[in-house]
Every structure is written in structure tokens, then in C-alpha cells.
Amino acid sequence: MTKKTEEYFTKPPQSYWMDSTTNIDYSALDKDIKVDVAIVGGGITGILCAYWLNKKGVKTAIIEADRILQGTTGHTTAKITSQHGLIYNKVQKQISEEFAKQYADANQTAIQMYESIAKEYNIECDLVSQSAYIYTLEDKYVDDIANEANIASSLGIKATYLDKIPLPFNIKAAVRFDNQAQFHPRKFLLALAGKITDNGVQIFEQSRIVDIEDNGDNGDYVLMTGRGTKVTAQRVIIASHYPFYNKHGMYFTRIYPERSYVVAIRMNENYPGGMYITAEEPGRSIRSQTSDQGELIFVGGEHHKTGQGADTIKHYEALADFAEQTFTVEDIPYRWSTQDCMTLDGLPYVGQFTSNTPGLYIATGFAKWGMTNSMASSMILSDLIIDGKSPWQDVYNPSRETIGASAKNFVVENLNVANKLIEGKLSLLPKNADIGPNEGKAIEADGQRAGAYKDEQGTLHIVNTTCTHMGCELNWNSAEKSWDCPCHGSRFTYEGDVIEGPALKPLDIHNDVNTIEKLIKDDY
């Protein structure tokens, strides 16, 4: 890292989307309520689900654990595109042409819906049309890119094979999707949240759902909050990113979380337009954004499984180095990271939670392509709840039979989780660790593994590093000052509070977690 780059990182990470918008606070759920549909999670998927259901006259409530639109939605790159890596070539080869067609139709329709809704409510959200490019600098991806261009074109996407792109790279090949888009997600969604609440949707914040029971009257579901209040609903949509509820579905065995990073730069050159992503690793994503500070260029990438990366600050440094090698960087005013749920076959899980849980639905596993997938998911779930069917339900079905394509990933990912569970408990720890200001590390305290962080005032914060979800041992995230789970992606503050699930309970230095007991009791 250059001295200049080091100067950019003196401030804590901050998302441009968060910094450029003002929160609209909603009250906590302080009394029991009854609705037709309860939506758990106030991110982009939850807001869009409520929008479509509200248009069809369904009494709906959104229940958010923290504040709406501050999780992954507030830390995205916000590309509205059906170009999800080399997805169509993969799906057509590994699964079927029909699934590839459904996926293309769903995501292409999603792009159009953003423009339609923004126009319907006159929402100013920096929504502009862009072309989206996948490019490669390596010979081995040329055929894959050519195939992607051909298959995408056959599916109705305006896709073009290229040997040059507007960026200053000597590429081997690229595919361009036209009529894609980008926007400011929080400007769009905060405005939409206001519109739907005016139309009767209820939104509750600071109201974490900690359990679901399906023994309510008339087959209703009863959701319990950590505040002790209840929501009774005929239908429930789990849109909490990583599903907090795993009974029956065992989603923790077929989802794994990945973190990725963004630096926002100001540069001397004129940006040529377009949204870009590499076919090869290390992945690099590039797009522009207008702001009151001038044009910003978002450079993203550096993905790794949550809790398993190198010293996390190094990922920001790698992106800054790439930016400085590509552009003339004047400043890096923003940087942030986010977390995405990855599925075993690369396609989202959207639909009925399991075949044996009527009335319970899920939307997760967008694999870094949440803008179009969230819109498509909201339309699918609305259709399933109102009409009992959707034209795209098969490719998104959480119970789809794609084991042939995903069996290898299933074994690899679950071996990784098992290794991390054991590895953390067997690791050698310093008994008396020397910890500097703003530093965190795992130490031994009273014969047990503990996490220690010293703040700028010199106060030491000690937590139990055993994740309250399934008992994995947490690792320190130096860039975000958090304790992250290498198994299922839960994240905690240095004081032990839950930042991101599936964990529901904070870290407690006095309590440990019995993984076997949790599995026996279905308490996960």
C-alpha cells in the first residue's frame, strides 16, 4: 500500500449510499398485531414484496431487526442488470435451457420494473440506462464469453460479443448486455417505503423476530420478537438475507456467506460509461455514480467467505492498488463491504420454505446480484401468495432438483464449515496478549477462548467468541471492527451485539454454546 493510499484509510468504512441519504425512523413493535402477510426483513426484497402485495390489497407488515435498508441493500454496488457473471452458459449446460430462459425473463423484467415504479411515484433516484460488460484478460475464458453472448442472445437479451471495451485494458474478449441500468438504491427504496406506508403497509424497526410457531388459530403463523410482542399472520415471507429460521429447511447446510469490498474513487480521467466485471479472479467490478462531490467510480471485488479472509484491511488495499494502476486517483472518499448469500448451484432460493410448510416463504441466495433478483423474487412471491403460481417459480424453487450440478459444492462447503468449527476450538491462543488501541484478537481468558478489543480510550472489551448460532469460533474483522463467524456468516460488534444473522442472541462471556444440543433441539 502506498503512503497516499494509507492516508485514504484513516477514516472508518462508510457506504456512499448511507452517507448520502437520511434515515426515516419507524417505531418498534410494542403490541401484538395480526396481518395477512408478515415480512421478516426490511431490505430491498422486503420492501418490494410489500409493494406488490399492497397493490393487490393484502394487509402486510414488515418487521426489521435493526433499521430498514441499512444491511446489504445499503452496501451494494447497485447494478440493475441481468448479467450475473457467465450464468446463462452455466445454467443451460448444467441444468436446462428452460431454467436459463426463466432466469433471463425474470431478471430482464426486473430491470423494466424499476423504471416503471420510479415513474409511477416520480422517484428521483439517479436511475440511468447503462450497458453491462463481462471482460477477460485471459485466453481460457474467451470461449466461455463467446458462448455466453450466443446463449444470452437466444434467450432474448440484447448481448454482443466484443474484442474491445471502453476501459483502458487490452482484453481478450467481452460480452456487452445493452439496456441495463444503475441507480441509488436507498433514494429509490426510502421513497417507496414512504409510499407503501401511506397506502397502509406497516413497518416496524428494532424488532428482531426470534422464533416462528405454526400453531396459531386457523393455521396461522405466530412470530415472536425479542421484545416479547407477537405477529400473527396467514403467510410469512423470510426476507432476512441469511434465514434466521432453519427448522425443517436446513438452509445452513446449503447457503454460505461471502464478503466483498468496494472503494469509491475520484479520478482525473473522464469515465467512459458502462458497468464492468471480470470473468476471472480476482474479481473486479467497476461502475460510476454521480454525487455532490463529483463523479465517483466504484471499484469492487476481493470476495472471500465471511470470517475466513486475510486481514480484512488488505482487501481494501488491493482494490485501491488496482484503482491506482488503472486510473489517476485523486481521492478515495468512501469504502465499504457487504455480505452475500451464495447457493450451491448459483441460483437463488425463492418460494415455499419447504414443500411441507404451506404459507411460509423464503427469498435468499442472490449471490451478489440482489438488485434484479430481489425484484424478481418479490414478483414471484406475490404471485405465489395471490395466484398459487409464477412463470419463474421452477428455476427459483428452493426445493428444485439440481443435486447433480451442486452435489460437489454441497460436500466442499459443508466440509469447510466442519473444519472451521473444529479449527477454532483447537487453535493455540496467547494467555496474555499485548493489544494496542483499535486492535482485536482472540486470547485465552480463564482457560477459555475469548475475544478482546481495545478502543481508542484504552478500554478493553472482552466477549465470548463462540457464535450463538451454531457454536463456531469467531474471527476478528480488522476493517469493520467486528467478530465474524467463518461457518454461517453471523457478525457481532466488539461489545457482542448482533450485527448480522443468522445468530439471534448476543455474545455472552458467561455462556457457551452446545452445538450438539442445538442440533437435537432444532434450535438454530
Image (cartoon, rainbow, N blue to C red):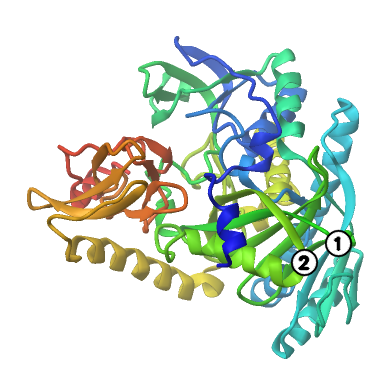
Given contact means CB atoms under 8 Å apart, are the residues at marks 1 and 2 in contact?
yes
Residue 268: image x %, image y %?
83, 59
Above or below, 511 against 224 in this view is below
Image vertical order of residue 206 relative to residue 487, above or below: above
Amino acid type at image mark 2: Phe
- Quadrant including the C terminus: top left
Q: Image quadrant of residue 508?
A: top left
Residue plotted at (42% across, 52% down): 489
Disc 1 marks a residue whose amino acid type is Glu
Element marked by disc 2: loop
Task: Quickly name the residue at label 2.
Answer: 327
Q: Where is residue 297 drawn, in percent x and y?
A: 76, 55
Identify the residue at horizontal 27%, vertical 61% (top origin): 421
Left or right of 28, for residue 187: right
Where, quadrant-wise, is the N terminus in this rendering? Answer: bottom right
Question: Position of 298 compared to 202: left or right?
Answer: right
Q: Quadrant of residue 195 in the image?
A: top right
Q: Measured from the top left, where is residue 519 in percent x and y?
A: 25, 50
Q: Is residue 378 above or below residue 165?
A: above
Residue placed most toward the observer, 134 or 298:
298
Q: Nearer the viewer, residue 363 or 420?
A: 420
Crowd class of label 2 (few under 14; some 14 to 19; many from 20; radius 10 Å): some
Q: Residue at x 19, y 54 (%)?
A: 443
Asked whether the viewer can see residue 25, the reply is: yes
Q: Nearer the viewer, residue 409 or 68?
A: 68
Identify the image quadrant of residue 89: bottom right
Q: Which mark is residue 269?
A: 1
- Looking at the image, how many numbered discs can be counted on the residues? 2
On the picture, is 268 further left or further right than 384?
Answer: right
Q: Position of residue 43 (x, y in %)?
A: 61, 36
Query: Quick one: 22 or 136, which is closer to the camera?
Result: 22
Task: Compute the Cα span from label 1 to label 2.
Answer: 7 Å
